[in-house]
Amino acid sequence: MDPKNAGRITLECRMGVIYLDQNYISNVAPHRDGDQAAAERELARTIAEQGEHRFAASAWHAYETAKADWDTTREGIIAYLDSVHPLWCANPHWVELHELIGYLDGKIDPLPYRVDAPRPFLDTPGQMWATFNGPERDASVFVGETFRDVVEMLRQKPLVAPLDYALASGPEAAQVARDAHKAGDIERDAPLLDGAWLHGLLPERNPETGIWVDKRQRDAIVTTLLANLGDVYWHCPALHAEDQIFRWRATGNSTLRPSDGVDIQFLVIVAAYCDVLVSSDKTLRRMASDVIKAIGSRCRVIECLNEL
């Protein structure tokens, strides 16, 4: 093992993981005609059968599929994902928390959270959905284990209204960050901003037991993390990815869109833990490439499976 990689989080299984972005899937799913779409579907089937790689999807596939205007589009995407039997990306904040707890193990005593290895990928949509729940965030009850079940649940407008609002507010929030960057506020206040971000990741209650964690304990944890932030990022790739995504958006000049919020969420896990990202979105590919390079990830970014 390369000494500089010693201690960095690794996955139990090093089978390659290929994340298929929603816009790519919508271009090649069975509801799409054409030789190129058919060839991509056949290639996906071959890759799945060979067993050297697993495909991955996320909750955002369900969210965007549920909002499809046409039944044929929704059914085509469901059929495609069912055919490739993907892994399911966990809630990025859930993964980041477990990265941080793993990093702190042996550095903080007593550590008020249980140490578990990060699990960026789950086997079923039900397992994935469970990572969005906890003492301080009550995800809607999910009954079912299929992608279709999640899609049907997310077609309930009252359920997704808060998420729709948050995504719609995203461009304004990103513009505030850009203005702050131009004014030099982000670099000047970096320790304060980083501290607030890390505090936000640490639950006020233990996720497993529901027991409150004293604020002084959380303050001590954040102080330790801030004092070793470079090392923290090296050992916590999802955390590092989110930091670099924020910086990319704050320093960039790309058009800000509500859908960017979706890209930001899934890209955290993709950049940190996937081997390949397949996306038809040129701006997303550019952002992903820059973030992946910044965090030293192994992930490749391509436009279609034919580029593998």
Image (cartoon, rainbow, N blue to C red):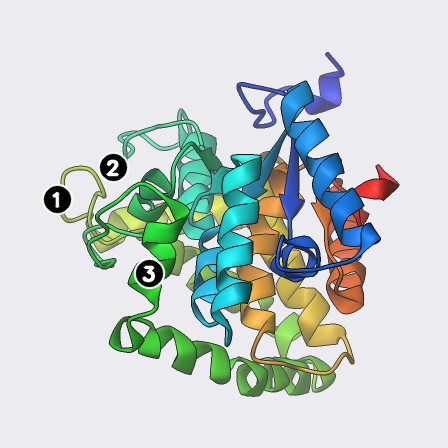
Considering only order in the chain, which callout, 2 or 1, is on the residue closer to the N terminus? 2
Q: Is residue 253 above or below residue 100?
A: below
- Report the Cα–Cα distance between label 1 and label 2: 9 Å
* Residue at mark 3: 152
Quadrant of res 248: bottom right
**In front of the other: label 3 or label 1?**
3
Q: Is residue 229 above or below residue 161?
A: above
Q: Is residue 227 visible?
A: no
Crowding at dot 2, Cα within 10 Å, few <14 / some 14-19 / many 20+, comes out as some
Q: Which residue lies at the image location 31% right of the left edge and 42% below the top edge? A: 126
* Residue at mark 2: 112
Q: Quadrant of the N terminus?
A: top right
Q: Nearer the viewer, residue 5 or 256?
A: 256
Amino acid carrying label 2: it is Pro
**In front of the other: label 3 or label 2?**
3
Q: Are marks 1 and 2 in contact (CB under 8 Å)?
A: yes
Q: Which residue lies at the image location 49% right of the left edge and 63% below the top edge? A: 74
Percent coordinates x, y for residue 137 in the rendering: 25, 59
Q: Are marks 3 and 2 in contact (CB under 8 Å)?
A: no
Q: Is residue 45 visible?
A: yes
Left or right of residue 296: residue 172: left
Residue reaching furthest right?
307
Amino acid carrying label 1: it is Ile
Amino acid carrying label 3: it is Glu
Q: Nearer the viewer, residue 200 or 78?
A: 78
Q: Quadrant of the C terminus?
A: top right
* Residue at mark 1: 211
Considering only order in the chain, which callout, 2 or 3, is on the residue closer to the N terminus? 2
Considering only order in the chain, which callout, 1 or 3, is on the residue closer to the N terminus? 3
- Mark 1: secondary structure: loop
Q: Which residue lies at the image location 75% right of the left edge and 36% below the top edge? A: 43
Quadrant of res 39: top right
